[in-house]
Amino acid sequence: MLEQIYDTRGFPFEKAMIESLKNPKINNLIECYKGEKIQMDNIECEILRIANPEIIYSDNGNDSSMVFKFTATDVEKSMIFLGDAYTYASKELLEEPQKLESYAVQMSHHGQNGVTKEVYDAINPKICFFNAPEWLYNNDNGNGYNSGNWKSITVREWMEEKQTTNILAFEGDQTIRFTKNGFEKIDN
């Protein structure tokens, strides 16, 4: 059993969200399970991780993130969605590292202080989607580049080692199309 301590700041919001799922107006709620594969046209979705009910200490729920992988079977490219997965989730994901390799990744916890370097090494992405504001991407607490205590720059260095292409949310809406030869950006 994991340590029964948690960060209470997010608890009221998390409880409200879970309670809202019990609304009788929601009639298509489906519970997923680890290893489940869902086919949608040319996209296969594989559930790599569901929330672990033993996780009570969760850094505001981050380690309860579901992790899934979409594979476009027609172009043989995949993208893994890490949500806000963190340390304990990293351990679970590394139990089956062969399932993690993916062409693209949604960076965990906005690209800072999420999953471990070992998880990103197993994913070995070519494209990284950083869903972070510019100040967080640059670790800027208001005093300039890398002045904050976030791990954004460290995570970016891990990706620089892999020579990834980084897609940055703060640059505005972008459309990326995977192709057999890689990817292309589409003008919006």
Image (cartoon, helix red, strand yellow):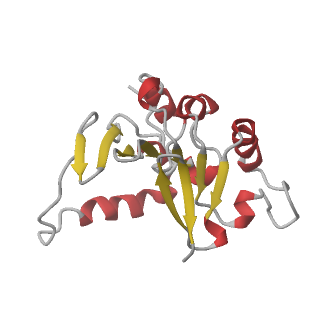
65 vs 43, left or right, is: right
Of all residues, the one furthest to the front in this rendering is 181
Residue at x 16%, y 67% (from the top left corner): 26
Q: Name the spot of residue 134 as percent of width and height, x first.
A: 72, 66
Residue at x 71%, y 58% (from the top left corner): 137
Q: How many marks?
A: 0
Q: Name the spot of residue 91 as percent of width and height, x first.
A: 49, 27
Residue at x 45%, y 30% (from the top left corner): 93
Name the quadrant of the N terminus: top left
27 vs 90, left or right, is: left
Quarter residue 154 falls in = top right
Q: In front: 140, or 9? A: 140
Q: In front: 72, or 22? A: 72
Quarter residue 80 falls in = top left
Vertical position of residue 119 compared to residue 112: above or below: above
Q: Name the spot of residue 173 as percent of width and height, x first.
A: 56, 73
63 vs 132, left or right, is: left
Residue at x 54%, y 77% (from the top left corner): 188
